[in-house]
Amino acid sequence: RIHDKSPILAVDIKGVAGKPADAEALQAPKHAFIYIQEQNRPDVRSLTIINHQRLLPPLERDNEMPFRKEILDNAAQVNLGLMTTWDLFRLVRSFTKNHWSPDQVIPIFYRTSRISPIPEHYEFVGKVKHVWRSAFSVEIVHGEIRVGGGIAVEFPVDFDEQEVTSLRLNDTDVKVA
């Protein structure tokens, strides 16, 4: 259990050779319920961290859909967070590399259903469209990018943060896109 703040977080960590079965993925809420009853504390959430397909190298695993839809649906109903050890590894590695603060990372562990390792201070703006030797283009879907601001790109392992030093829109220098 993690007692750093309310709600308390009951965590169950497992390693499985394949993808997790219902009983393996949904064990943490049982631990949370027992703790709620024993301590008379209603402020308890649950988190399951699964080392799925543990016999495969991490990038060869099914990291897009390690949990069946039924497990995800059930997790949403019982406020259970589901994370893989690969997600946790990526999160810790990017936390260290990019000097994120604990306040930007701690809330991730309290999310519900499938938890992505994207920190609180990130906002999705779009996808990388083209890459050149010293620049890249972004198809902006939501929000804006500003010169002097920052941008992060999600790679298979890390998030890489860069300062925005220049912007071009339709072959014209701009300050905001």
Image: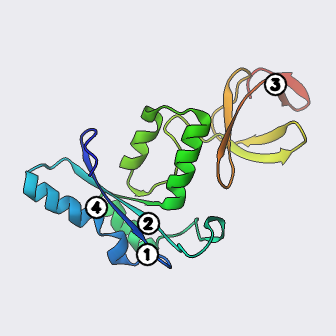
Which residue was labeled with disc 2?
Answer: 50
N-terminal label among 3 and 2: 2
Which residue was labeled with disc 1?
Answer: 20
N-terminal label among 2 and 1: 1
Residue contact at pointers 2 and 1, CB within 8 angstroms: yes
Type of amino acid at the residue the image marks with label 3:
Ser
Alpha carbon distance from label 3 to label 4: 46 Å
Residue contact at pointers 1 and 3, CB within 8 angstroms: no
Which residue was labeled with disc 3?
Answer: 166
N-terminal label among 1 and 3: 1
Which residue was labeled with disc 4?
Answer: 78
Type of amino acid at the residue the image marks with label 1:
Pro
Residue contact at pointers 2 and 4, CB within 8 angstroms: no
Q: Which residue: 53% across, 74% down?
A: 53
Kindly state the secondary structure of the residue where label 3 is placed: loop
N-terminal label among 3 and 4: 4
From the image, state whether disc 3 or disc 2 is nearer to you.
2
Task: Left or right? Give the position of 157 relative to 80.
Answer: right
Q: Which residue: 31% across, 62% down?
A: 77
Kindly state the secondary structure of the residue where label 4 is placed: loop
Q: Which residue: 77% across, 41% down?
A: 138
